[in-house]
Image: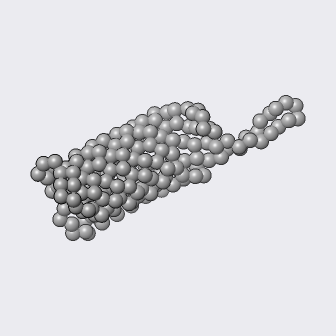
Amino acid sequence: MAKKGLLALILAALFSTGVSAQSLWSLGGGVLFDGGGIGSYERQRMLWHGPGDMRSTTDDVSLRSFRGGVWGFADARFVELSVGFLYGWESLHIEGEDVSFRESASLDVSLLGKIPFFLGRADIFPLLGIGYSSNFRFKVGAGADIDIWHRLFLRASVLGSYRLAGDRFDRGGFGITVKAGVGRRM
């Protein structure tokens, strides 16, 4: 199911950017940092306090991540498709305490709509879209392109996200993504 969703996201991005007859295309890449909640659930367990004394307790269990990596983007004036490779750590928390850490790697694919406001040598734009990295996310944020030389520009963006609950979780999680890179207008 996840592979079909990822394929649908990529095809939608290619179709939407191909159909939109935008004259301003760009390609680029850079570094990104991504962190936040992956999901959480409540775990119920029984505790033994002595002969004939069993008590039920509920623990809040959550999984969080902090990863860094590289990303590349291709966009038209109003649409950005990006693919990133992330590597970092996931931590399991029970009742707010770190229980375990593990290394993890993931692929992140995002399709974002943007409305640029041209301010001379800089463009700023709100961003809204979806992404996939182990489960689907809704993303919202802002970005900017700053011209540095001829067709080259610096791109930076900050995105907040809500990750939908996956198979293992009852609730999703909130996160943030920060991206910085260099691009070239075609």
Residue at (29, 45) in percent of width and height: 180
Q: Quadrant of residue 69?
A: top left
Which residue appears farthest toward the top when viewing the image? 50
On the question of residue 4 being in view, the answer is: no
On the question of residue 178 being in view, the answer is: yes
Which colour scheme appears in the figure? one colour
Residue 71 in percent (x, y) is at: 30, 45
Q: Tell me if 20 is positioned left or right of 164 in this view.
A: left
Which residue appears farthest toward the right when viewing the image? 52
How many marks do you count on the picture? 0
Residue at (21, 55) in percent of width and height: 122
Which residue appears farthest toward the left when viewing the image? 150
Nearest to the observer: residue 133 or residue 11: 133
Nearest to the observer: residue 60 or residue 4: 60
**47 w.r.t. 178: above or below:** above
Quadrant, the C terminus: bottom left
Nearest to the observer: residue 168 or residue 183: 183
Residue at (56, 37) in percent of width and height: 92
Residue at (32, 50) in percent of width and height: 157
**101 w.r.t. 120: above or below:** above
Q: Quadrant of residue 138?
A: bottom left
Residue 32 in percent (x, y) is at: 34, 43
Residue 57 in percent (x, y) is at: 74, 41
Residue 17 in percent (x, y) is at: 27, 64
Q: Tell me if 157 is positioned left or right of 171 in this view.
A: left
**117 w.r.t. 31: above or below:** below
Nearest to the observer: residue 62 or residue 145: 145
Q: Tell me if 145 is positioned left or right of 133 in this view.
A: left
